[in-house]
Image (tube, rainbow, N blue to C red):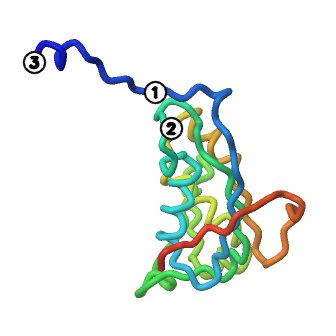
Amino acid sequence: MAELLTKSMKTTVAKPAEVSRRWYLVDADGVVLGRLAAQVAHVLRGKHKPIYTPHVDCGDGVIVINAARVRLTGKKPSQKLYFRHSGYVGGAKLVPFKRMLERRPEFVIRRAVRGMLPKTALGRQMVKKLRVYAGPDHPHQGLATEPLKIDS
């Protein structure tokens, strides 16, 4: 019994130099926006790795293609609004989801993923590893990417 009390557990803490990064390719065609964003944020944070450490950026990079073909469920496509404010009186701007998806589909996914990351300097660093493209083409063809399956 005494030997059990003297043994100590070793917790490994990842150091930024030890982290190896991979890139994943995600096809957003027909995928629900929230599910996509949750799983992409999971990979960006590094929670899929056994060396995950909350205060270190352990995550991998993600390339999302076909952002213009992402979907929402229920009445959200007609009801969801994106809000911003100019800072002046009466400066509120509301943009419906459908118009935002037509004009800036990359913004829709980037905003959803960013909302699921920490609101700190570490979260801002993590979101830099996200690349989003409206169509099927992307300029990272030479990058060794692995497909990431999104559960629908």
Disc sitting over residue 12 in the figure: 1
In the image, what residue type sits under mark 3?
Answer: Met
Mark 3 falls on what kind of element?
A: loop
Q: Position of residue 28 (x, y in %)?
A: 63, 76
In this orientation, which residue lies closer to the viewer: 30 or 74?
A: 30
Asked which secondary structure carries label 2, the reply is: loop
Query: Where residue 51 is drawn, which disc sits there?
Result: 2
> What residue is shown at x 61% (from left), y 66% (from top)?
109
* Distance (Cα) linking label 1 and label 2: 7 Å
* Mark 2 or 3: the one toward you: 3
Q: Identify the element where label 1 is drawn.
A: loop
**Mark 1 vs mark 3: in front:** 3
Kind of residue at disc 1: Thr
Name the side, left or right, on which 131 lies relative to 45: right
Give the mark nearest the N terminus, 1 or 2. Answer: 1
Q: Verify CB contact (< 8 Å) between mark 2 and mark 3.
A: no
Task: Pinpoint residue 146: horizontal percent, then vertical percent.
Answer: 70, 64
Measure the alpha-carbon separation of dots 1 and 3: 26 Å
Q: Which mark is residue 151?
A: none
Where residue 149 sits: x, y (%)? 57, 72
Which residue is label 3 attached to? Answer: 1
Picture quarter containing residue 140?
A: bottom right
Asked if residue 131 is positioned above or below residue 135 in the image, the reply reads above
* Vertical arrangement, residue 56 with respect to residue 137, above or below: above
Q: Name the foreground residue: 3 vs 141.
A: 3
Alpha carbon separation for disc pair 2 and 3: 31 Å
Badge 2: residue crowd in 10 Å (few <14, some 14–19, many ≥20): some
Contact, mark 1 vs mark 2 (Cβ under 8 Å) = yes
Earlier-in-chain disc, 2 versus 3? 3
